[in-house]
Amino acid sequence: MIVAFLPCVATAQMAEDVNRDNFINSGDITTIYRYMLHGADQFADNCDVNGDGVVTARDITSIYDYMLWRDTSNDRRMSFLHISDTHSVDVTLAPALEILNSDPTFSFMILTGDFLPTETMIQEVLASEKPVFVIPGNHDAWNEGDVTYSYGQQGFREQVLNRLYPNGEVNFGDDIANFFYADVTQNDCTIRVIGLDLYDFANMGKPVVMNSVVFSQKQIDWLIDVLENSGDKDGVIIMTHNGFGNSLQNTRDPNYVNEFISINAYAWWDTYNYFGDGDAILIPSIVEAYMTGDDLTDAQFKSGHKVNKVSQMINVTTHFNEPHNNFIAYYGGHVHFDVVEYLSEYPNQLMSIIAYGGRGKGNNLNDLIKTNTGVDSYTINASNINFTTHEHKIVRLGSQRKDDGTLRESILFNF
């Protein structure tokens, strides 16, 4: 696998260089978003990139076409947005929905847990013209009075997800739990979105610790069946809340570095993943079998739940029979900082974790300099998938500047 930073494109004062810094990059996209959202910007006169007399999402598309897809106009591609951990705060959700619905570049959006939605936030998602896929986080699933808008696992299904998808827009794998899949097609390309419920308390029982991940045998059997029938899709993504770390340490590989790994990921290495009594390699092992065709037979993994101090086990037998090259990445949140990297034990599996999207710095895990309002306050990742070249480009929209003064702008991976 090749990992490279997506280069800025040098320019001789082209229209796409909106902020006039002599480069065409995500800063120009952010400038237009800032103008569209707030109606004022020092570079407002430059925002009409395509010269049609108005500033719209078409101007943003012009920059995307130049920066990300230049000389690949015939390639098959698809783009979507990723946010996470809104925690009842509308700072990131509102601009993300505005971008999603105003920019034809994007086909859908994913929100990877700790949504904790107010009624206003639910209504905003319901009003979206494009699909928004949501999975619960530990705070969504755990309703012991610690958070105002924590619904509990079954309550999240009944009061949130059933309202968001009343007409079968997603295919749930269970009547009470929150795992599902959905297919999104645009420009003759199809991405299968798989949402995993890391807190399947209804089928397994509730653990003692809120952060503990609990899988049921039913969900794992369902996942294997869904993957078995995903080979004809152009791409497959898996939404989780927690990340997957090294199986021995339950953490990320500290020897790997890129611009989308938080400065604080080193200091807080043990919070990258928390599975309690579960096996962090359960899902990656299944996906590895899907990717390679080297099937698992009677493999056992800890489910994340104990009865009388004895760990319950998940039994895994896969029958994919052949390799598949359409798995793109996992998407998650939970730790409130950014980490985008291949899993240390599974170097062909990319994990994209995005930082907390609330007010201020969120918490001491976040290395982003954020404001209370405006474009610098929210965290949105745009994933741009090129199925012809098998390239996956991630562009940061919103908060980019880190504590050390450098920027988290864009990065390129292969899948």
Image (cartoon, rainbow, N blue to C red):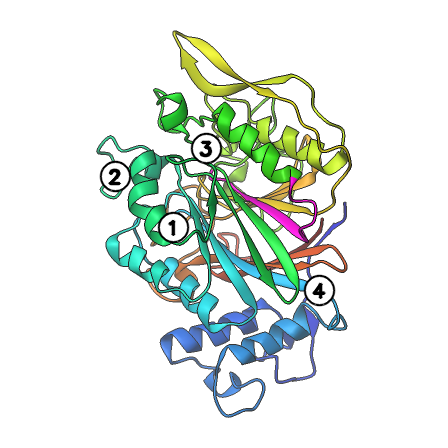
Amino acid found under the numbered disc labelled 3: Leu
Q: Residue placed at 34% from the left, 41% from the top?
A: 157
Please give the range of residues in magenta: 229-241
Task: Name the one closer to the observer, 256 or 57.
Answer: 57
Give yes or no for contact between labels 3 and 4 (Cβ–Cβ under 8 Å). no
Amino acid found under the numbered disc labelled 4: Arg
Residue annotated with mark 4: 76
Amino acid found under the numbered disc labelled 1: Lys
Per the image, label 3 sits on a secondary structure element best described as loop
Q: Nearer the viewer, mark 2 or mark 3?
A: 3
Identify the mark at residue 147; answer none if there is no mark.
2
Give yes or no for contact between labels 2 and 3 (Cβ–Cβ under 8 Å). no
Residue annotated with mark 3: 198
- Determine whether, in the image, residue 82 is placed left or right of residue 97: right
Task: Name the one closer to the observer, 10 or 195.
Answer: 195
Q: Nearer the viewer, mark 4 or mark 1?
A: 4
- x and y percent of residue 16 in the render? 61, 80
Per the image, label 2 sits on a secondary structure element best described as loop
Q: Residues within 10 Å of mark 2 (few under 14, many from 20)?
A: some
- Say which label, 3 or 4, has the lower sequence index: 4
- Say which label, 4 or 1, has the lower sequence index: 4
Task: Name the one closer to the observer, 396 or 197.
Answer: 197
| Residue 327 seen anywhere in this rendered image of the structure | yes
Q: Residue placed at 68% from the left, 60% from the top?
A: 6
Q: Is residue 122 above or below residue 208?
A: below
Q: Nearer the viewer, mark 1 or mark 2?
A: 2
- x and y percent of residue 26 in the render? 58, 67
Residue 97 on the magenta segment = no
